[in-house]
Image: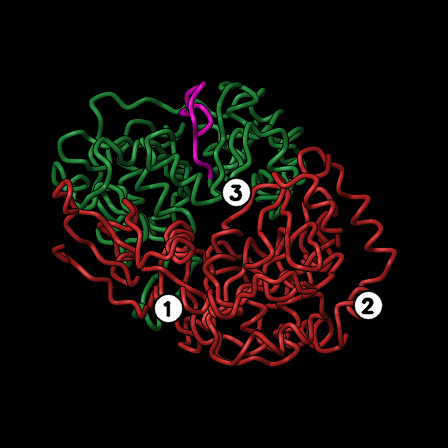
Amino acid sequence: MKFTDTELMICLAARSIEDSSTAFVGYGMPQIAAILAQRLYAPDLVQVYEYGAIGPDVATPFRRNMMADARNSRRSFAWTSMNWTLAYAAAGFIDFGVLGAAQLDPFGNVNSTVIGGTYERPKIRFTGSGGGNEVASLCWRTILLAEHEKRRFVPKLDFMTSPGYLDGSPDAREEAGLPRGTGPYRVITSLATYDFEPQSHRMRIIGVREGQTVDSIKDQMLFEPLVASRVETLAPPTADELRVLREEIDPDRVVIGRPE
Amino acid sequence: MEVLESGGGEVRLSDVDEVRQWMREKKTRKLVDKLCDERSAVERYVFDGAYLSYDLSSMVRGPMSLEREIVRQRKKDLWIAAKFTLLDTTLLLGGGCLAKIDVGFAGLGRTLFAAIESGRVKTIDWSNGTLALRHMAGAMGVPYLPTRALLGTDTFKRSGAKVVRDPFTNKKICLVPAVNPDVAIIHVNQADRFGNARIFGPSVAPLETAMASKRVILSTEELLDTEEIRREPGRTTIPYFLVDAVVLAPFGAHPGTCPGLYTYDAANLDEFFTARDDAAMRQYIEKYVYGPKSHAEYLDLVGADRLMKLRDGEKIRQGYYL
């Protein structure tokens, strides 16, 4: 069955979130991945939103701009507010953070602020951190989602909005004052999945999409990633995943798009 | 305490004792009727150059009727805390009201980004969480609060935060300065005439924002008797003595949703989002902000038909209205 890049990324992300865990979820793709995970793989996943909802049973279909509204917050365990949800993360209660990334470097640092020009007069301005800096700083394991375009994978970011492993040195995060034992866990793109090699903290290819090879992936990046000793071929979205995505979660194809 | 690194961003610093004195002198503890219309509230409390904070955003329970009034009165040079924002910055910018944005999330809309790229509006980058925390510090009467966010990033460098060595543990920690906005605008579900207010549902930092701010304007969907407030005090979010003005504004969050009451106006939001350039944004503002002279006229323009559909379109009341 044909599927979109976004659908694949969402499915890969949904499969990597564990059941009975807590996950801080950003807008758009991360939301849909978390809902899909909850419907198929992780029924007891507790979604946590920066605006204060903890453990909602999010209503579907997904609607554009659905954040902090009644459908997104439905049947939560608790409704709080931002200083509290981020305190939960800072205190060590949040297992996963799921974030989109406009630009990434080899150490999983993320740019969502500016590209090109100067800070004062950027060529392209984005939204800035939102809650991304907190999520990447404070959750135990961060999952980063990015459309696989060459220009997004750069040796050096134009601007480091949210921290990955910083300069990659062994204790870089802890030395900067970030919580010990935290950091990027997976990068999921439309072509490949990566983890981070434990010593060097560099992105490492662990999976490639059907029809791609390690070399074809490398050709589509501006830095050289490491390669795991065993690279798996990523299973395409299953019929079940696509049914839930297309019929229950996003029938208007607001986020998932339509296959060509 | 040893300062290890300082962000270069401009900070609106507060003097905690000056703020305390203000709260003593300017925030009456008398139960006075603060009900007024949006025009007089904004005339009285929003001045050119003010630091403005709002809670939540244009999409969800945002103080949209008050934001429109600020644009209508052509306030200038505002510095705003965009701690969780969507269209608010874009609307205020389109109205020529903005000089600086403390960015948590800058907002949405092509005209906003174009203005930043051309240097017409200045940004100071923080994060949603650190802006919320700065309001918490302002609410607590302390000059700063520590956080383990921002550390190691360019966001830190562009913010006005500092990294210090924590005198207790000797580890690095980030300090963010308190913010005490000149004025806060907050949309609530229910309030009495004195300003005791209830917010239903999750939120960003309404109490922190109200406590930290020198002036607080509430817009409310509904007016309650104080007896009603006293009957269920556990539901009060904001006590009256924080509040300077109460404006009755049913559908005050339109075109956003007020969860539990009415849903988004998708058609109106589309009009907003399709404004790709300044001219189109001016047209939107001409039609929806300058055209109607008040929130009541605005609701006339939107039309009873549409509003009734939006109310019917909100199917969830559970958790908001008992």
- Read off the residue under disc 3: A28
Q: Secondary structure at mark 2?
A: helix
Q: Secondary structure at mark 1?
A: strand
Residues marked 2 and 3 touching at CB (< 8 Å): no
Q: Quick one: label 3 or label 1, which is nearer the N terminus?
A: 3
Mark number for residue A20? none
Viewport quadrant of the N terminus of chain A: top right
The amino acid on which the numbered mark 1 sits, given as a three-letter code, is Lys
Question: Which chain is indicated by disc 3?
Answer: A
Foreground residue among A89 and A171: A89
Query: Drawn colour of chain A?
Result: green
Question: Which chain is indicated by disc 1?
Answer: A
Query: Drawn colour of chain B?
Result: red
Foreground residue among B272 and B47: B47
Identify the residue at the far front of this view. B30
The CA distance from mark 3 to mark 1 is 24 Å
- Read off the residue under disc 2: B301
Foreground residue among A100 and B168: B168
**In this rendering, would B149 be left or right of A190?**
left
| Residue sitting at x 40%, y 49% | B129
- Read off the residue under disc 1: A123
| Residue sitting at x 14%, y 35% | A200
The stretch of residues the image draws in magenta is: A13-25
**Mark 2 or 1, closer to the camera:** 2
Q: Secondary structure at mark 3?
A: loop
